[in-house]
Image (cartoon, rainbow, N blue to C red):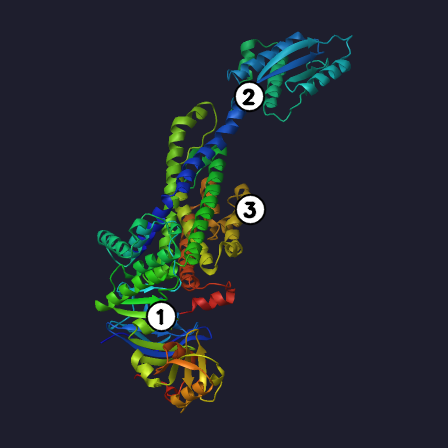
Amino acid sequence: MNVIELRNVTKRFDEFVAVRDLSFEVRQGAIFGLLGPNGAGKTTTIRMIVNIFAPDEGEVVVMGEHVSPELQSRIGYLPEERGLYKKMKIGDQLLFFANLKGLKSAEASTRVDDWLDRLELSDWKNKKPSDLSKGMQQKIQFIASVIHDPDVLIFDEPFTGLDPVSANLLKSVILDLKKRGKTVIFSTHQMEQVEQICDDICLINHATRVLSGGLKEVKRRYGKNTVILDYEGPDSFLADDLVKRHNRFPNYSEILLADGADAQEVLKRALAAGARVNRFELVEPSLNEIFIETVTGKDLGAHAARVPNTE
Amino acid sequence: MNKVLIIIKREYLVRVRTRAFLISTIVTPLLMLALIIVPIFFATRGGGDRHVTVLDASGDAELFDAINRSLQARAGFGGESDRRDELLGQTRYTLTRRVVATSDDLEALKLEYQERAAKDPDSTYLVLRGDGLDNITPEYYAKNTSDFSIDTLERAINDAVSTLRLKRAGLNQSQIAAYTRRVNLKTNKITASGEVREGGRADFVVAFIMLFFIYISVLLYGMFVMRGVIEEKTSRIVEIVISSVKPAQMMLGKVIGIGLVGLTQIGLWALSAFLLTTVGVSSFSSRGVPMPSVPLSLLVYFVVFFVLGYFLFATLYALVGSTVSSEEEAQQAQMPVTMLLVVPMLIFNMIIANPTSSASVAVSMVPFFAPTLMMMRIAVVNPPLWQILGSIAIMLATILGCVWIAARIYRVGILMYGKRPSIAELGRWLRYS
């Protein structure tokens, strides 16, 4: 069952088309990655789902209904541009947001305490935002988006500015929400995080969809066209017609093969050049690689030319 | 509606609970009180004692006695003195007579006293020449001559001279008292409904206080609204809020919430003013200081015009706040709105001078001027009801229009950062779906 459906949605601001003829579905209980470079139209898309903007064309259907103020209370939204009231105590702010989402004060109060406890922020309940670190404020904003236990959650760059411990804590909370049947839309530029937690993805660029589907399926589409090579020695063999592009990391290189190139041939040439190979692995491209290739318009491989259409 | 209430509650509590609110609520009436009391205090007490040497070349001992008597009578509020003397005549004069014989050199004496007065501000002198009672031209010399109490001296001399003239014309003491009894002009105001009530100068005081009060409060609380909107923008809180409520609800909640803070404060001030007038100021009244009596209907109009004026301008300030990204930008952007509020303060003199002219009526019907100018006209002349209701209707219609426009600009503006939009862009924002 699809919890969110966008059908041929277009949104313009004057001459500028922010979103063009965009369609996608988000399955119930999935973590859906909405990806794209800056200015691709992600935020506008999300704002149409949470009823901040209305589409000019097409329709946005959430839980079987057109978006409406009533639906807003069943959605939790953590925007990328987020903040807190400077002069309000943390506990009061969270109560305020909970009330706005329709929670009665008594119920809201218990939940505020529970969530503060869960994210290890109970001591800060009566403090003002100026006393909190940026990461702590971020966790407070996260609580504001989940306090009313919504069925649909939208997180726009939830991990930026968090230390690894806090990021992991939040990640486990998000996975826990998924376990409880919540549907999550997750927007970020950090592809490793998408690989870790997303089930499905949709990549948009220049206001239109360029790639979508299940994460595993999308990667499979590109095939094993990437070599991970851990070696010591000269780099000269990388400048070769068999290598389309490579990323040299301190401990290894990620080598994207040219069309029809044989991975074994690359290995031979590396050895011939005098490199000592510690690891050689043929893998699917990373999502990061796919993202860059798709957005910059360069061909990743024979299969990528066909932009997949899930309809 | 419920969500608007939640916003109102937040806006209200977050402001009322601040120390700044507490302080301004307590300090402002004290300041106002000081502004009223201090001048009165100085006017009534300030003069203190003044010593006047009378260089009397008139050769008329009776004249000096008459002046002295007249002055002493005034100092105690007694007898025939008029109300202005009661208010201003608290300076106690002590006269010392220095008889100047015809053989003495008056000019040399004057010089001597002049030097003395130059050193000592309390030393003053009065010259009476020997011109006879009919042509008498007294001269007063003092370091400070801009003092209101000099009026008292002049009146005292006048009274003394005329009393003396009458006496010498053959009238006795009681006849003189009867014939020179002062007449006080009683001013009466005819209201729109044809009633007659006591009025006059006090009405202008009330009108001016109300005009000024509406101007200051609308400006102050309008600015609070604008700053509130900017704070929500710069702290990036807006998007979280408008994923729960409509931007228009958010704006309305803020305007109403802050307006209630304003009413609370004004209410507290009115209460303290009431207490102060019943307890404290009544003592001024009993001493002849004209205390305006404010009819209840005027207070009701005051609240109505404050609320309407606040709504009108707060909406515009919210609009301005939504289109800027910082307080600095706001300083420029709010100018046109503030001008609408300032213009009445520049022209109210012309209105108060001629409150019933057709120009005055027309200007006071302009929705942005009505909160101040129509209010002032109501306090001064009781304009026909159709004008009052008409201006209220025009204001209501304008408020509706402004709320509509502001809400549409606001919902786009609060999510826009960076460059300030041009007028043309604002026009296009109105049409966004």
Q: Which residue is mark 2?
A: B89
Expressed as whole percent of the image width and height from the top left, the position of residue A279 reads: 37, 80
Between B183 and A85, the one lying in front of the other is A85
Q: Which residue is mark 1?
A: A187
The reply to whether label 3 and label 1 mark residues of one chain is no
Chain for disc number 2: B
The answer to whether residue A297 is visible is no
Between A192 and A251, the one lying in front of the other is A251
Q: Tag on residue A64?
A: none
Between the C-alphas of marks 3 and 2, the distance is: 34 Å
Chain for disc number 3: B
Expressed as whole percent of the image width and height from the top left, the position of residue B304 reads: 39, 46
Expressed as whole percent of the image width and height from the top left, the position of residue B332 reads: 54, 55
Q: Is residue B37 left or right of residue B411?
A: right
Residue type, mark 2 in image: Gly
Residue type, mark 1 in image: Ser
Q: Which residue is mark 3?
A: B346
